[in-house]
Image (cartoon, helix red, strand yellow):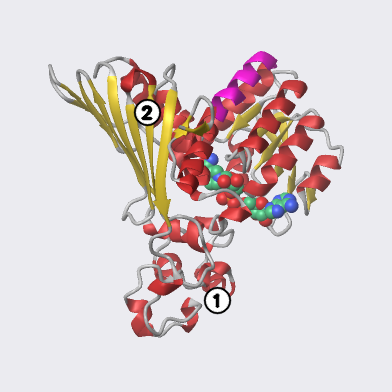
Amino acid sequence: MEVNKPVKALILGYGIRGRAYASYASTHPRDFEIAGLADPVAEFPAGAKYPTWKSWEEAINAGVEADAVIISLPDRMHHKACLMALEKGYHILLEKPIGCTWQECKDIVEAQKKAKRLVLTGYVLRFAPFYKKLREVISSGVIGELTSVHHLAAISYGKAAHAYCRGNWSVEAKGTGMLVNKCTHDFDLIEWWTKGKVCKKVTSFGSLFHWRPENSPEGAADRCQDCPQSVREGCPFDAYKLYYDRTDLRYHFADESDEAILKMIETSPYGRCVYACGNDSVDHQTVLMDYDGGLTIILEMESYSQQRTRVTHFYGTRGEIIADERKIEILPFVGDSTTIIPAQNGHHGGGDREIMTEFVKLVRSASPDRYTKILEAALESHRIAFLAEESRYSGKTMDCVTGKPC
Ligand SMILES: NC(=O)c1ccc[n+]([C@@H]2O[C@H](COP(=O)([O-])OP(=O)(O)OC[C@H]3O[C@@H](n4cnc5c(N)ncnc54)[C@H](O)[C@@H]3O)[C@@H](O)[C@H]2O)c1
């Protein structure tokens, strides 16, 4: 494609992620243009000059001139939409997870190799200035060789109740488990931090500890609006507390006004009692990884945290690094400690914007060999995540080389 023309893309799924990527067209009109939007329920921007459709299939079959598609659909639609988009010759920005099973992921890699198009996974954190800086610090060797890493993905009780108890990812069979949905990001970061090292074994434990019917407070109703005030008062997961009193979760809804939020609580799944959601997703999970050379890594995914953040503690033969998505503390055994606070602006610490910049650059670069390498690198995070899930289900440690229990 001509490098001075904007990359034109169809956006399939105009929910939170679709809207985030679409906004790049207004901030970077020379680089990116919307060729059309597809969503069955979303309100599309008024006065848009591009076509809109009710389903992704219609959009992809419409024959509209476009270089790429952005797949920001629910997880279970990624596989089919991605295969069809590759068949049509589009470049793709594919939200994670790549597929809902390991087989689906492998199908996409095969199709990508045939089509020779870009499939960039929505690993926005890799592009965020904070994480780029952190990787630079680790790679500098300032703490010597890594011996172990303790990584906490703290979801926060409000966000976890929203997504993994009441929302899209509450029932594992409808998409992927919480670990694959949430922590493929974290596995990807780990893969990036440990570049060149091979994970040999993985084992995992986790469960749905709390959001179960038997933990429902006495007298609680199935929806918050019907729940007695005395019960709601003591409930941290009360939908009025999470969505009406607080405003930080409102970005999940297209209309964030007080009136719309009250209506949403009364009518949508997000107004259900957390103990009556029919959910089976885990609410916490731990993964232990054993790397060649002796490096060991612990990943902890936790719903019941006050803050929504990631905290990583790196231990090396010459010192420690502690990173918490705001600051990077470097604590060498010899010499002075330093703290770096990388500048961040925008959603996902600027990662949403930076991934779009990279996507445009990659589409314009027309480099098929590189495209395959990019997808294969993203696949590693999924491979380990699916093996960790197999370990949780089977209670066995998995051999990452053979893909079988040890
Ligand atoms: N990279 C990240 O950090 C990140 C963060 C959140 C979510 N995600 C991923 O992004 C994807 C979308 O998540 P979201 O939070 O935007 O969810 P969302 O529910 O806000 O958006 C999904 C949209 O797809 C639409 N949709 C459903 N069926 C459709 C169809 N047949 N055709 C067209 N559109 C259809 C829905 O109406 C909805 O608007 C998920 O796969 C999720 O895992 C990635």
Q: Position of residue 182 (x, y in %)?
A: 48, 45
Q: Which residue is located at x 81 percent, y 31 percent?
A: 87
Where, by quadrant of the figure, is residue 348 drawn? top left
Q: Position of residue 216 (x, y in %)?
A: 40, 75
Q: Position of residue 56 (x, y in %)?
A: 76, 47
Which residues lie in the magenta part?
Answer: 366-379
The label shown at residue 22 is: none
Query: Which-is-in-front pick, marks 2 and 1?
Result: 2
Q: Nearer the viewer, residue 46 or 246?
A: 246
The label shown at residue 266 is: 1
Q: Which residue is located at x 37 percent, y 28 percent?
A: 290
Marked residue nearer the N-terminal end (2 or 1): 1
Relative horizontal placement of residue 337, taking residue 326 as reference (left or right) = left
Magenta-drawn stretch contains 376: yes
- Quarter occupied by the N terminus: top right
Q: Which residue is located at x 58 percent, y 36 percent?
A: 27
Q: Secondary structure at mark 1?
A: helix
Contact check, label 2 and label 1, Cβ < 8 Å: no
The label shown at residue 290 is: 2
